[in-house]
Amino acid sequence: MKNQSKAFELLLLLSVFVVATCGLIYELVAGTLASYLLGDSITQFSTIIGSYLFAMGIGSYLSKFLKGNLLSWFIRIEIMVGLVGGSSAAVLFVVFEQIVFFRLLLYAQVILTGILVGLELPLLMRILKDRIEFTDLVSRIFTFDYIGALFASLLFPLVLIPYLGLLRTSFFFGLLNIAVALLVSHKFGNELSSRRSLRWSAWLGIALMVAGIALSDKLTSFAESLTYADAIIYAKSSPYQRIVITRNKNDWRLFLNGNLQFSSEDEYRYHESLIHPGLSRVSDPKHVLILGGGDGMAAREILKYPSVTSIKLVDLDRAITDLFKKNEGLLKLNNRSLVSNKVQVYNEDAFQWIRQNKETFDFITVDFPDPSNYSLGKLYTLSFYRELYNTLADQGALVIQATSPYVAKESFWIIDQTLRKAGFQTSPYHCHVPSFGEWGYILAYKHDLPEVKQLPAGLRFITERSWTTMTDFPADMIARSNHYNTLNNQVLVNTFEREWAVYFK
Amino acid sequence: MITRRSFIKQGSLVAGSLLLSAPYSCTSDSTIPGSLGGPNAKAGHRIRTKTDGKIKEVIQEDIVIVGGGVSGLSAARWLKMNGQSFRLLELEKEAGGNSRSGSNAISAYPLGAHYLPLPNVNNTELLRFLEECNVITGYTNQRPVYNEYYLCFEPKERLYINHHWQEGLIPSEGVSPKDRSEITRFVELMDHYKNLQGADGKMAFEIPVHESSLDPKLLQLDTLSMDQFLTDNKFESPYLRWYVNYCCADDFGSALKDTSAWAGIHYFSSRRGHSENSKFDDVLTWPEGNHWLVKQLSRPSLPYIKTQCVVLNVVLTDKGIDIDFLDLESNELKQIEAKKAIMASPQFVNKHLLHRTASVDYSKFNYAPWLVANLTVSASLQEKRGEPLCWDNVIYGSNSLGYVHAQHQNLTIPKEETVLTYYLPLTGTHCAAARADAEKKNLGEWTDLIFKDLEVVHPKLRSETSRLDAHLWGHGMIRPDPGFIWGEDLRRAATPIDNKVFFAHSDLSGISIFEEAFQSGITAAKQLMKSA
């Protein structure tokens, strides 16, 4: 009998330890998630910790109303803490974009977990009060409680977040909580009322937590997919990027790594501005090169010039070009340009392709993603532009998408300066694309700016008069910079990063 | 009732078991495919054991170059440019010495030396060679314009320090103002030496080493260790000392106390490269490291290079020199009767080949062993906070030099995998002991050692690595021990014998860098032609 009671105490003290660890972990999970999703970590952590501790106080107060078989209550509460706390990160992640009152849900969850955790210790003390001398009891329970807290606070940043991640961590501790409940219910079956239902619910809870751990990765990507406003009709990871297409009635949107590439509602503005101011100035263009532009929209505009006999399109990602060659809805958007017999697609790296290419082109379109990292930055360097210079016919023209001269004006003018350094004459211009904002391009050529020959019929945005307004830069889009971007300084990437960071703040 | 003691014990047991079960359960000890290679040690040992047997073939030749490292190839280039006929014998399957490379489906990668700092503007021979291979594309304002594809791209260097990747290798983030001011004082002192001229009007520290000033006041520094030099000048900051130690390990494979102060300062104060289109401290590098330079260097001499030949004996005769060698391909003993020879082999080999009359104490030539490992890893490594992946990535406090991103000079957008080249100088005071110790280790032991070091910055590296190819250089680099560079033994070992045998190797400069090897090859070739 003495052994039995010793085991009992030990087990319950172990529970205190686990409970304390789990309790603090839930608090940290909530705080971390709130600062991830809402920003301003000082405010988030402070208010979360405050509400959590306060809720524990409520729980302690409420504990006096629990009557009857206390051990059963304890097990019930353990299971509930496990379920609520364990699933907290997952629930918050998934609903973040979905509900207006995210904060409300966050704090409701924090308070609920706090109340349940607050119930645990007073309850345990009541259970143990007749079995352990009070002085010893208080000292031991609180010792374990505080050791658990220290343990959790060290484990969380050093081990759990780096190795398990947020979602798995919270499920794992939910699992521990419920495991304690199950263990207690097995060890002290004879002291419990309704032990069958208790055990069943514990097992159910454990199953849920295990499923949660197993599905954490899926849940994360599901949660991310919910950050798109419209229905996702296509999502795939290629070796290079995450491709997502959303659709809302007639608005199709393409996202690469979460960045909007076009909205079908206004992409004609972007692509007409990209192609026509330049191509309409080349007399009798025959051979055209597109670098990037795997969606086929630029090719669609170029095919409006009957003299063009061949278009070579170099886009790294086969997943993109295949998509825009095969999907009926997307084929409508690019007017089947990529399946035209004038268009040849090369799924190769643009830098490598251009270095081994011997052909020259009458018109070249460079439509790469913005220079947001060092890999992409290489495609905006003096070395690359020198290769372009050698690839462009003497009387030809070249156009480059050059990010937003409003948001990243210095970046825009660095691109211009780099092109000039490579030997080009340039004419920077810009237009407004509602889904993007103010957008910039640079037209580059080898001699004087050629006159517009003729614009194709049926354009929706570009007219003969557009050029005058497009080349007029308001004061807030002008930055004079002597910097130019090279492989060994990559000044553009740093500038771009700085300018967009300010904008997002 | 449980006692206090048992209670504490149980408490800690619970805590301990939880700790153990959480993080370590996910690590598996599945082995990663890979290889452990190195110089052809078996063939090399034939030099010592010699081979008795009949000479199957006797060949006549004007000049023989023994050894196809950078110095041998440089001598060959010079002889070729001057219309001399020669034959170069190399032990390995490929010439290049420790500037060779390997490759896999992902990338070419260096097995040893991997970069060349911008040469000083008065190093005209080297500049001319760089023009030959289009590394220098022209001159503007009398300053060289370097080929942008070969200049190290941005971002160049980062240091993991205080749980964060900072830009550059000089410790700065989280470093106290006191340490910082000591670092600044050190940098200023090195700048002072950089611009200092000796009493003879020569620059205090020059590349090649033997162009430096012979002012005894400066050479006095060679008798000190770098460690002593720092102490004498009251440099105590652990951050600074770590950094200087790192630099010595980087260029010499030695620790502060085993490095001559003259050599240590030379590292910081000898580079005065100028360029029109880069900063003075930029470097030239290629995915395959200095093997790229070796390919350019050896191109004109390729038909005259014979690989897999173990030279066993070099004997001076009345007519010239007899060189016995084992042709590993046919496993036959052969002999070349040559008029002259350039020994472009390291002195730890020469001591077995030559029977000198002049006494050279070869035990003064110490070579630091190195381990270089190439890890094929996921292109999206789990990273710590701070600067993104750079060309050179160093971990503060580590014994290794960190790793170089082999794909850094690649222009293409990265795919799923990439290659990291890990450098570990084995900086024991006693090179032979360190070498013996290293030779005992198997691939698994090296693998564990490498991951233990790198997991600090890439916690999931083991699971992100698909292959690990290690290369052990038993005699990786000549070590500039105090007193060595300006000592008698080095000078004697470099002195030609009877106007017939000439010497070229970076170990004769005391510093294992491309510039020294390149220059020593030219010097030996010039001496040889002058002797005719």
Image: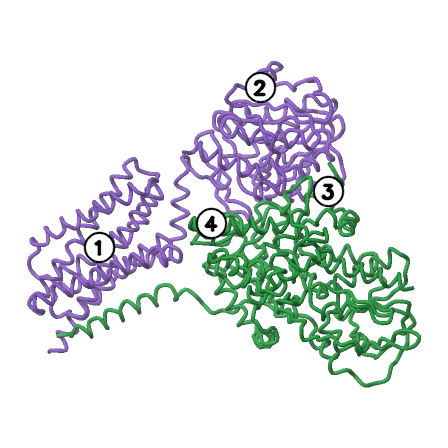
Where in the figure is residue B217, as x and y percent of width and height?
A: 65, 58
In this rendering, do the residues under marks 3 and 4 share a single chain? yes
In the image, residue A434 sits, relative to residue B230, either above or below, namely above
State the quadrant of the C terminus of chain A: top left
Residue B261 drawn at (x, y percent): 60, 61
Going from N to C along the chain, the mark reached first, 1 or 2, is 1
- How far is mark 1 from mark 2, CA to CA? 61 Å
Q: Secondary structure at mark 4?
A: helix
Residue B516 in which image quadrant:
bottom right
Residue B166 located left or right of residue B286: left
Give the CA distance from mark 3 to mark 4: 34 Å
> Which residue corresponds to mark 2?
A470
Looking at the picture, tell me which residue is in the foreground, B404 or B282: B282
Q: Secondary structure at mark 2?
A: helix
Q: Chain of mark 1?
A: A
Q: Residues within 10 Å of mark 4 (few under 14, many from 20)?
A: some
For label 2, the crowd category at 10 Å Cα-Cα, with few meaning under 14, some 14 to 19 and many 20 or more, is some
**Between marks 4 and 1 in the image, the one whose residue lies nearer the viewer:** 4
Instruction: Name the residue beneath numbered marker 3.
Output: B144
Asked if residue B9 is positioned above or below residue A465 in the image, the reply reads below
Q: Please determine whether, in this image, residue B331 is positioned above or below residue A137.
A: below
Same subunit, tags 4 and 1: no
Q: Chain of mark 3?
A: B
Residue B423 visible to the viewer = yes
Quarter of the N terminus of chain A within the rendering: bottom left
Residue carrying label 1: A81
